[in-house]
Image: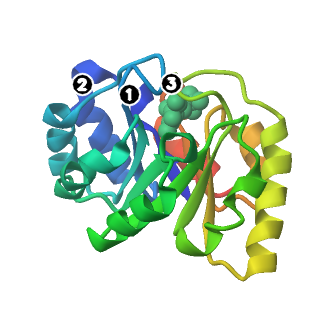
């Protein structure tokens, strides 16, 4: 599956890029929310995202790079989000937060920074709809892929198989045709891609190519 990241879109013409994604084979639309605290950058907030949510025909895959993400469960729900991704590193009471997300009617997903090992998920893997592995340090698009992420995908796949969990594996950051092919071979189910899609000569065709890896 493919979840194009709107972070690499043309912010002066968001409606045009959302429309391109609507007409493409993309499965979801990936939305990156930052707070300048958990990550050293700020992207867009709810006044902008409510318009994106109105325009999109794709399910929203919302990635919160913020501290205390549970505070915003009602706002994310109001966007009509399909998946709400929270960072492992931002949630001391992760089990509770995942439960709150599910109770609000969304699919809960947990995201790991590059420095957080997969084994930290052992006691929570049964409770998540999806695990998002970062292929870069979160906060910016267009960064170089951290190769070790491919090994982490294989390790996570093993944990999912051994525990009988049904969690999906998503990877975000540095995904292009080359890294994407290796991630899918290692067991990734969903690829997020920002710059590889929006910097491509034909973004719609790149979405198709990444989806079919
Ligand atoms: C990074 C974001 C990503 C970003 C990926 O913090 O979480 O979703 O848009 O961008 P690329 O695909 O350019 O690495
Ligand atoms: Zn993201």
Q: Position of residue 93 (x, y in %)?
A: 47, 54
- Locate residue 136: give its quadrant: top right
172 in relation to 122, above or below: above
Screen quadrant of the N terminus: bottom right
Which structural element holds mark 3?
loop
Distance from the alpha carbon under mark 1 to that under mark 2 = 8 Å
Give the mark toward the camera: 3 or 2.
3
User: What residue lies at 14% left-to-right and 40% top-to-bottom?
Assistant: 51
Screen quadrant of the C terminus: bottom right
Left or right side of 70 for 181: right
Q: Position of residue 114 (x, y in %)?
A: 70, 36
Distance from the alpha carbon under mark 3 to that under mark 2 = 22 Å
Q: Position of residue 55 (x, y in %)?
A: 18, 47
Which residue was labeled with disc 2?
13
64 in relation to 94, above or below: above
Counting labels gives 3
User: What residue lies at 35% left-to-right and 26% top-to-bottom?
Assistant: 35
User: What residue lies at 30% left-to-right and 73% top-to-bottom?
Assistant: 103
Which residue was labeled with disc 1?
9
The answer to whether residue 195 is visible is no
Closer to the chain start, of discs 3 and 1, is: 1
Which residue was labeled with disc 3?
139
């Amino acid at each position: 599956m493919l979840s194009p990241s709107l972070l690499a879109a043309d912010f002066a013409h968001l409606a045009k890029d959302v429309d391109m994604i609507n007409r493409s084979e993309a499965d979801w639309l990936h939305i990156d929310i930052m707070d300048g605290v958990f990550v050293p950058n700020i992207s867009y907030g709810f006044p902008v995202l409510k318009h994106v949510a109105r325009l999109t025909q794709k399910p929203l895959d919302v990635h919160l790079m913020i501290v205390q993400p549970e505070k915003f469960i009602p706002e994310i729900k109001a966007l009509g989000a399909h998946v709400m991704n929270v960072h492992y590193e931002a949630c001391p009471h992760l089990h509770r937060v995942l439960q709150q997300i599910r109770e609000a009617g969304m699919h809960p997903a947990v995201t790991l920074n590059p420095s957080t090992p997969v084994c930290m998920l052992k006691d929570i893997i049964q409770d998540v709809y999806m695990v998002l592995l970062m292929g870069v340090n979160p906060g910016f698009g267009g960064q170089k892929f951290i190769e070790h992420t491919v090994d982490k995908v294989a390790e996570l796949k093993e944990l999912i198989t051994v525990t009988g969990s049904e969690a999906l594996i998503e990877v975000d950051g540095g995904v292009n045709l080359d890294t994407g092919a290796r991630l899918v071979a290692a067991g990734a189910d969903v690829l997020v891609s920002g710059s590889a899609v929006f910097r491509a000569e034909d973004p719609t065709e790149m979405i198709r190519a990444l989806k079919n890896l």
